[in-house]
Image (tube, rainbow, N blue to C red):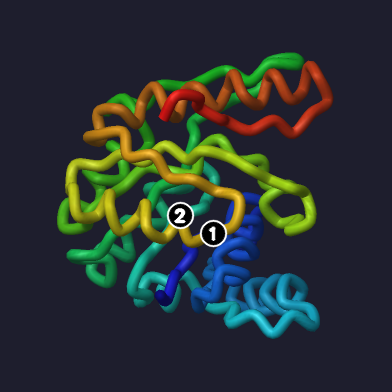
């Protein structure tokens, strides 16, 4: 599969790009600054021979499957101008609306309840799926980290959820769990604040694992 990552040069985008490229998928690593995207892609690939190409965000939006990896407060401004290119496509949102207060992360609740719902409103012709929220970026980029994690996937389009789960399941160390509609995105995103706060307090890189499923 060809996977485009909008805003892919930050820690979350880099980490996902490394994992998805290692799984054999072609990656278009997007950025507002195409030169920066080229540099980050070259750094990621190193001598591995991964199919990762740096590009502008609009080129990444032309991919078969698109992931929005921008910081939450830039998500809508970055994605909305790309609405034409993203028409009819799956757009996976991994944004968490969080702010730091002291040594804790605090969840911010957007007007529509989640950043994924905000994105769906901004891209009415796209099939928005929410996933990848609880993954530590550094562990994602480090393929030798021993990362094992469950990934909660939700969205209003059942076929889009299934295709997103298939992509995630193809990545070493990850198990996709289909949750339900986009209404579930709010609590999933907000729980990221708990995960990061735990990691800060315990100086850890914990992941989400669900027993019994």
In-front residue for pair 148/120: 148
Does residue 104 appear to the left or right of 115 in the view shown?
right
Give the residue drawn at x 31%, y 25%: 113
Q: Position of residue 106 (x, y in %)?
A: 57, 17
Q: Position of residue 74 (x, y in %)?
A: 48, 47
Identify the disc placed on residue 171. Answer: 1
Q: Residue furthest front?
A: 212
Q: Residue furthest right?
A: 203
Q: CA distance from mark 1 to mark 2?
A: 5 Å
- Where residue 135 sits, quadrant-wise, is top right
The secondary structure type at the circle numbered 2 is: helix
- Where residue 79 sits, quadrant-wise, is bottom left
Identify the disc placed on residue 147. Answer: none
Look at the image and tell me in which quarter the C terminus lies.
top left
The secondary structure type at the circle numbered 1 is: loop
Q: Is residue 73 visible?
A: no
Q: Is residue 156 visible?
A: yes
In-front residue for pair 209/130: 209
Give the residue drawn at x 66%, y 26%: 196
Look at the image and tell me in which quarter the N terminus lies.
bottom left
Crowding around mark 1 (Cα neighbors within 10 Å: few <14, some 14 to 19, many 20+) is some
The vertical placement of 53 against 116, above or below, is below
Give the residue drawn at x 74%, y 80%: 48
The vertical placement of 102 against 56, above or below, is above
In-front residue for pair 187/76: 187
The vertical placement of 21 against 175, above or below, is below
Residue contact at pointers 1 and 2, CB within 8 angstroms: yes
Does residue 156 appear to the left or right of 73 in the view shown?
left
Q: Position of residue 121 (x, y in %)?
A: 22, 43
Give the residue drawn at x 56%, y 69%: 23
Identify the disc placed on residue 168. Answer: 2
């Amino acid at each position: 599969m060809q996977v485009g990552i909008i805003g892919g040069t930050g820690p979350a985008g880099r980490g996902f790009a490394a994992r998805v490229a290692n799984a054999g998928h072609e990656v278009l690593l997007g950025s507002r600054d195409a030169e920066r995207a080229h540099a980050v892609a070259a750094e990621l690939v190193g001598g591995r021979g991964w199919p990762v190409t740096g590009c502008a965000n609009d080129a990444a939006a032309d991919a078969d499957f698109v992931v929005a990896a921008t910081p939450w407060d830039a998500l809508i401004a970055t994605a909305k101008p790309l609405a034409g290119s993203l028409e009819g496509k799956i757009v996976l949102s991994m944004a968490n609306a969080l702010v730091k207060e002291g040594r804790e992360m605090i969840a911010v609740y957007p007007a529509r309840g989640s950043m994924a719902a905000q994105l769906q409103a901004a891209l009415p012709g796209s099939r928005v799926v929410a996933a990848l929220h609880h993954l530590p970026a550094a562990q994602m980029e480090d393929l030798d980290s021993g990362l094992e994690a469950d990934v909660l996937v939700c969205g209003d389009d059942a076929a889009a959820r299934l295709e997103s789960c298939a992509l995630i399941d193809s990545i070493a160390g990850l198990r996709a769990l289909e949750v339900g509609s986009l209404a579930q995105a709010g609590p999933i995103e907000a729980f990221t604040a708990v995960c990061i706060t735990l990691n800060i307090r315990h100086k850890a890189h914990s992941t989400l694992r669900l027993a019994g499923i």
